[in-house]
Image: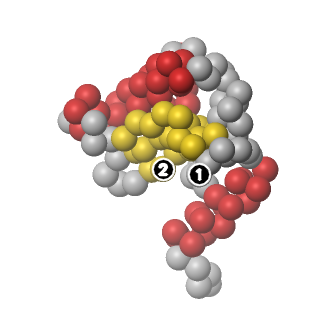
Amino acid sequence: MSVRTREARRLRRRRRVRAKVRGSAERPRLSIFRSNRGIRVQLVDDDRGHTLAAVNWTEPELRDLGPMEQARKAGELIAGRAKEAGAEAVVFDRGGYLYHGRVRALADSAREAGLRF
């Protein structure tokens, strides 16, 4: 039986992913945080330690949507904001979550909106 909590296991996976994934100004890291209430996405330049663009589930256009539709809309919004910030390609950081469900919906909609992974 495992003594680690679900959150502790996710943080361990997150650290393992972050050891390999690094964002730069030309290709920032697309970082995802998923909770039961919503989803949050950031474009991060790890060289400077700056967030270039962000989308949060509390924004008015995302607040009243269901979980999957919220993730799809967040992907479209982050792709648009990435283009405004001058980023055409990103490095995908799934944050220790499985590439399934809302995480996959967000990634697919961001790709359809023109963001390259």
CB within 8 Å, label 1 to label 2: yes
Element under disc 1: loop
Depicted 31 relative to depicted 106: above or below: below
Which residue corresponds to mark 2?
Answer: 33
Quadrant of the rendered image containing residue 14? bottom right
Horizontal side of 20 relative to 96 (left or right) equals: right
Check the image and report above or below for 108 versus 43.
above
x%, y% of residue 60? 22, 33
Q: Residue at x 55, y 31 (%)?
A: 107
Mark 2 surroundings within 10 Å by alpha-carbon count, few (fewer than 14), some (14 through 19), many (20 or more): some
Q: On screen, 117 above or below 5?
A: above
Query: Which is nearer the N-term, disc 1 or disc 2?
Result: 2
In the image, what residue occupies the spot 50% across and 19% down? 84
The three-letter code of the residue at mark 1 reads Gly
Residue 54 in the figure: left or right of residue 117: left
- Tell me if I can see residue 51 in this picture: yes
Which image quadrant: the N terminus?
bottom right
**Which residue in the structure is indicated by mark 1?**
95
Quarter of the picture containing the C terminus is top right
**Mark drawn on residue 51:** none
* Cα separation between marks 1 and 2: 7 Å
Rendered location of residue 75, percent (x, y): 47, 28
Q: Position of residue 77 (x, y in %)?
A: 42, 25
Residue located 71% across and 37% down the image: 24
Residue 12: % across, % down: 66, 67
Foreground residue among 113 and 90: 90
Secondary structure, mark 2, is strand
